[in-house]
Amino acid sequence: MNITSLLIYCIIVTFTPGPTNIVILSTVNNFGTKKAMEYTYGATIAFGVLLAVSAMLNTMLITLIPKILMIMQIIGTIYMFYLAYQIYKMDTSGPTVNQTGTFISGFLMQFLNPKVVLFTMTVFPSYVMPYYSAMPAVTLSVIAITLIGFLAFVTWVLFGTIFKHFLQKRKKTVNVMMALFLAFAAIMIWM
């Protein structure tokens, strides 16, 4: 197994902007680090669950992947446009109570995030299963990749926290840009 190649793939996929990372940045910007971390914990646990399910059911899923991917693309695209709209219309005049930066919303987002679903379905058959099929090795891979995902999410929380003052001054512009990036990510699913 080429661990370097696996690590590069995992880091590129998890650290680059995607729906979860953009929502984390938006949550830090609009509702603070604590809410973003709550969301991050939910996203991380769901990421790990998706990895575990993919690893355990990889052979069964291989025949269903085209059908699952189409459904996830449709649901994920709709959800991403919904999130983009929510970020765009967010009131920037003052503090509000947020229902989207929660553990549950972070958890559920992962199951509707096409980037995460595609990643979890490809990482094991491409990098792990050809070399290791024993349960301890697969379990260790799930844990290691989940930790990489958690580090990526926390990096986005830290980025948002460090630049929060800058982002707060330009809140409406930042919200519009994040909404556009999220809408672009939704459109790219179909390209």
Image (tube, rainbow, N blue to C red):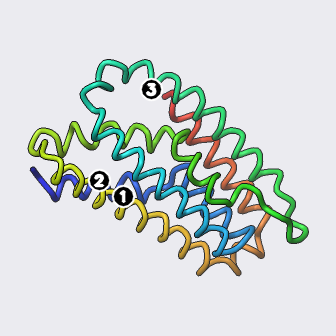
Mark 3, Cα crowd under 10 Å, few <14 / some 14-19 / many 20+, is: some
The residue positioned 66% from the left and 55% from the top of the image is 178
- Asked if the residues shown at circle 3 and circle 1 are in contact, with their CB atoms under 8 angstroms apart, the answer is no
**Residue 7, horizontal then vertical, whole percent:** 24, 58
Which residue lies under the disc numbered 1?
A: 146
Which residue lies under the disc numbered 2?
A: 142
Mark 1, Cα crowd under 10 Å, few <14 / some 14-19 / many 20+, is: many
State the SS at label 3.
Answer: helix
Task: Tell me: residue 114, above or below residue 88.
Answer: above
The kind of residue on which mark 3 rests is: Leu
Mark sitting earlier along the chain (3/2): 3
| Foreground disc of the pair 3, 2 | 2
- Asked if the residues shown at circle 1 and circle 2 are in contact, with their CB atoms under 8 angstroms apart, the answer is yes
Mark 2, Cα crowd under 10 Å, few <14 / some 14-19 / many 20+, is: many
Q: Nearer the viewer, residue 124 or 45?
A: 45
**Residue 105, horizontal then vertical, whole percent:** 64, 52
**Residue 68, horizontal then vertical, whole percent:** 45, 24
Q: Nearer the viewer, residue 132 or 21?
A: 132
The kind of residue on which mark 2 rests is: Val
